Image (tube, helix red, strand yellow):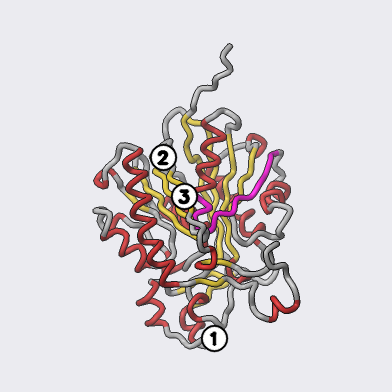
């Protein structure tokens, strides 16, 4: 025996999402910082965002989204053998938030976290795909979660208007037909981590009373640099992925990009020869929940009948690192009652 394993097809068999109950509108923000509803909508496309309760951590949101994904996949939880969580706001530096999710769901599975900024979901998808395609596991729970409100400086109008909380989850399974193209474009340019980062709390600058007083545990961002990088990353990564998949822009039925800023998305589609109406956006309702944005939007598209069987779907993302990632799905699920 050669010991070689057959490369198997992989598909998404169920999706779920969860948004916290509290909604913070642009009009609410007008009372908190020097900004306006008109400015926020014009510059970002955002009208409101969901904010986790004081007693809600990342795992709490992730568990709700995961339960919904398990339900829609109609899978025996005992058949899920691995949990992958992607997040920049874990419950704790360690243990992995995935371990908490695994325990609370009662799964007999391995568990680990991935941290790749807002690109984390596609990094997680590539990881889950590889485990299943190679025959290591048959079914994996992938969940992406964000509680950015916990690391947001609510006096900084340049960042607080952009961010939101939420979780998106999916079950990936070995399949008789291709549901995910076997080509992922993952990349990183780490020469200047200060473009988008949280300065303190790690081994480079451990937490002290002074770092807390100086607000160094909040997210910091150089907006103009992120904007320029994001547009370039989405366009170039998407083109590479489509080429590797043997696809042209006309083959793409739907684009679900990282939901960061409507102006970034607009600048991207102008350079990609894909019509605006194919770019699916719900950021006006959810703002930017980091790596959870794509799976939340994807679940929303499924539930509202926008993403249907036989569609070809492009998922481009970018984030801290600076990182980027993209891939293509072939949606094979029949519509289900929710």
- In space, the residues marked 1 and 3 are separated at their CA atoms by 37 Å
**Would you say residue 123 sits in the magenta stretch?**
no
Please state the horizontal and vertical placement of residue 222, each as a whole percent of the image: 47, 72
Closest to the camera, between mark 3 and mark 2, is 3
Could you say whether the residue bearing mark 1 is in a helix, strand or loop?
A: loop
Residue placed furthest toward the top: 1
Could you say whether the residue bearing mark 2 is in a helix, strand or loop?
A: loop
Mark 2 Cα shell of 10 Å, populated few (<14), some (14-19), many (≥20)? few
- In space, the residues marked 3 and 2 are separated at their CA atoms by 33 Å
Give the number of the disc on residue 187: 3
Residue indicated by mark 2: 334
Closest to the camera, between mark 1 and mark 2, is 1
Q: Is residue 326 above or below residue 232?
A: above
**Would you say residue 114 sits in the magenta stretch?**
yes
| Between discs 1 and 2, the one toward the N terminus | 1
Residue drawn at x 41%, y 37% as measured from the top left: 181
- In space, the residues marked 1 and 2 are separated at their CA atoms by 45 Å
Residue indicated by mark 1: 32
Mark 3 Cα shell of 10 Å, populated few (<14), some (14-19), many (≥20)? some
Report if the CB atoms under discs 1 and 2 are less than 8 Å apart. Answer: no
Magenta-highlighted residues? 109-122
């Amino acid at each position: 025996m050669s010991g070689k394993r057959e490369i198997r097809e992989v598909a998404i068999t169920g999706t779920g999402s969860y948004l916290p109950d509290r909604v913070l509108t642009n009009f609410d923000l007008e009372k908190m910082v020097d900004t306006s509803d008109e400015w926020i909508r014009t510059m970002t496309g955002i009208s409101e965002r969901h904010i986790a309760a004081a007693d809600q951590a990342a795992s709490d949101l992730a568990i709700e989204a995961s339960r919904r994904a398990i339900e829609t996949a109609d899978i025996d939880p005992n058949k899920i053998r691995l949990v992958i969580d992607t997040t920049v706001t874990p419950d704790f530096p360690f243990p992995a938030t995935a371990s908490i999710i695994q325990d609370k769901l009662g799964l007999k599975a391995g568990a680990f976290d991935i941290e790749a900024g807002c690109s984390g979901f596609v990094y997680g998808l590539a990881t889950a795909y590889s485990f299943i395609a190679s025959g290591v596991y048959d079914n994996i729970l992938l969940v992406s979660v964000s509680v950015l409100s916990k690391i947001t400086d609510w006096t900084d109008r340049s960042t607080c208007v952009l961010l939101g909380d939420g979780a998106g989850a999916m079950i990936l399974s070995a399949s008789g037909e291709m549901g995910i193209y076997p080509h992922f474009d993952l990349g990183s340019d780490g020469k200047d981590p200060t473009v988008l980062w949280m300065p303190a709390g790690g081994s480079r600058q451990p937490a002290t009373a002074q770092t807390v007083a100086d607000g160094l545990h909040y997210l910091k961002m150089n907006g103009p640099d992120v904007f320029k990088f994001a547009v370039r990353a989405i366009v170039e990564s998407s083109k590479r992925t489509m080429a590797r998949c043997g696809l042209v822009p006309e083959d793409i039925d739907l684009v679900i990009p990282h939901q960061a800023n409507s102006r970034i998305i607009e600048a991207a589609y102008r350079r990609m020869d894909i019509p605006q109406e194919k770019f699916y956006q719900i950021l006006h309702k959810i703002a930017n929940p980091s790596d959870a944005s794509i799976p939340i939007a994807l679940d929303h598209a499924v539930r509202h009948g926008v993403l249907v069987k036989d569609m070809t779907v492009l998922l481009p993302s970018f984030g801290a690192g600076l990182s980027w990632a993209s891939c293509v799905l072939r949606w094979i699920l029949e519509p289900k009652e929710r």
